[in-house]
Image: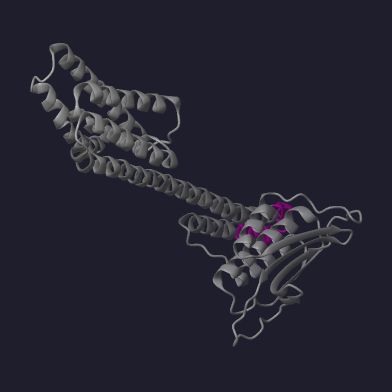
């Protein structure tokens, strides 16, 4: 605020002429008092316009009213007290540049300068008015429009930076929500299954129950490590790890698993991570919701009319559904998967029929000229 006040105060140096005119005693006592009052009012209006509206959108009634008062004071004081007061029109031009819309400000600056010139012809010699005041009035008014534009641009940039920071924070919260949902959903489902198995084995098979409890401990420790890594932002899911994890989860649930023996090589890190998350969430959904007896996972390259894709398909023979019935409504897991795939230009499709439920994820492939096709797993 003080920096702005000091910058605006520089223009008050032009007030030397009317102040000197009042101090020289060239007018009657009444005219001198009225001159001081008029000058004080003019400066007050000028500071109110320039300081308040330089960085704010103009256009309200108060702005136009204050400009009208300022222009009226400049005209009346110049006509009654003489040529030293013509300098007030320089401030009128500056105020117009500071408070009016850009298009209107240009016309107002020209009108203010023209009015000053006409009054100057009447109260003084044209040769004294044109070089001394017309040029400052033009330059001051248009310079203020440029300054105001810079100030408002700076304000908009600060607001844009704040918006970008907020969006980044929101994106990070979404990432954390997706990661924690996928991590904990898979791990807790496996822990629940193994806990149920241990409970059933305890009466007659304590050694097998102990093995299940040991597995629960191992899964819990790994889940803790994964959550810490996800919070730190360093965890990256991989297809080989998720294929192994899906096989373990499906077998623990008593579901016959048909999975690829290995993952395709040469995948970019981002695409591999997304497919790994898709596989983890799909396997978790099969274990928790399908009631299936068999699950088949295929992973490999597919050629379609839209181009080459890396396709991950998870099919189960879970609950029978009427032909043509829609797939289940997407929950947080499927919504998160769709968001992940969208980041790598991928797509997610789901289909439900009497044979079970199918989830298909596709990511477009753009191989280089020397690349070989990816190995397809079945």
Residue 126 place in picture, x, y as percent? 22, 38
Q: Which residue is drawn at 53% across and 59% down?
A: 226
Quarter location, residue 55: top left
Residue 201 on the magenta span: yes
Query: Which quarter of the rendering shows the N terminus?
Result: top left
Residue 356 place in picture, x, y as percent? 84, 60
- Residue 374 vertical position relative to residue 281 in the rendered view, above or below: below
Dominant secondary structure of the magenta stretch? helix
Q: In this view, does 139 lie to the left or right of 302?
A: left
Q: Is residue 120 left or right of residue 108?
A: left
Q: Residue furthest top?
A: 30
Q: What is the tally of numbered marks visible in this picture?
A: 0
- Residue 378 can be seen, yes or no: no
Which contiguous range is marked in magenta?
A: 196-216
- Residue 289 can be seen, yes or no: yes
Quarter location, residue 148: top left
Q: Which residue is drawn at 31% across and 40% down?
A: 141
Quarter location, residue 6: top left
Query: Which quarter of the rendering shows the C terminus?
Result: bottom right
Residue 147 place in picture, x, y as percent? 32, 44
Q: Nearer the viewer, residue 18 or 28?
A: 28
- Residue 259 vertical position relative to residue 4 in the rendered view, above or below: below
Q: In this view, does 89 lie to the left or right of 197?
A: left
Q: Residue furthest right?
A: 323
């Amino acid at each position: 605020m003080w920096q702005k006040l000091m910058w605006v105060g520089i223009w008050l140096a032009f007030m030397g002429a009317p102040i000197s005119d009042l101090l020289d005693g060239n007018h009657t006592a009444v005219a001198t008092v009225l001159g001081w009052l008029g000058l004080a009012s003019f400066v007050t209006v000028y500071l109110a316009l320039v300081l308040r509206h330089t960085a704010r959108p103009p256009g309200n009634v108060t702005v136009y009213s204050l400009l009208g008062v300022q222009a009226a004071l400049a005209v009346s004081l110049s006509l009654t007290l003489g040529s030293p007061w013509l300098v007030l029109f320089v401030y009128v031009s500056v105020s117009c540049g500071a408070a009016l819309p850009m298009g209107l400000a240009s016309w107002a600056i020209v009108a203010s300068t023209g009015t000053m010139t006409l009054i100057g012809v009447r109260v003084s010699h044209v040769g004294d008015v044109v070089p001394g005041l017309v040029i400052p009035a033009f330059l001051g008014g248009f310079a203020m429009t440029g300054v105001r534009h810079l100030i408002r641009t700076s304000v908009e940039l600060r607001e844009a930076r704040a918006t970008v920071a907020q969006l980044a924070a929101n994106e990070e919260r979404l990432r954390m929500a997706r990661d924690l949902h996928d991590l904990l959903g898979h791990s807790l489902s496996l822990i629940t299954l193994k806990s149920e198995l241990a409970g059933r084995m305890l009466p007659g098979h304590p050694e097998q129950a102990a093995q299940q409890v040991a597995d629960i401990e191992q899964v819990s420790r790994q889940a803790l490590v994964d959550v810490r890594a996800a919070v730190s932002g360093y965890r990256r899911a991989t297809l080989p790890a998720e294929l192994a994890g899906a096989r373990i989860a499906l077998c623990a649930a008593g579901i016959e698993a048909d999975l690829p023996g290995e993952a395709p090589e040469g995948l970019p890190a981002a695409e591999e991570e997304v497919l790994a998350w898709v596989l983890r969430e799909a396997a978790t959904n099969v274990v928790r919701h399908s009631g299936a007896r068999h699950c088949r996972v295929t992973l490999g390259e597919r050629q379609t009319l839209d181009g080459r894709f890396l396709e991950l398909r998870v099919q189960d023979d879970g609950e029978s559904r009427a032909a043509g019935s829609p797939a289940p409504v997407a929950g947080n897991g499927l919504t998160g998967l769709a968001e992940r795939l969208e980041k790598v230009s991928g797509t997610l499709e789901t289909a439900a029929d009497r044979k079970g439920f199918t989830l298909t994820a596709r990511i477009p492939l753009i191989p280089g000229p020397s690349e070989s096709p990816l190995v397809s797993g079945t």
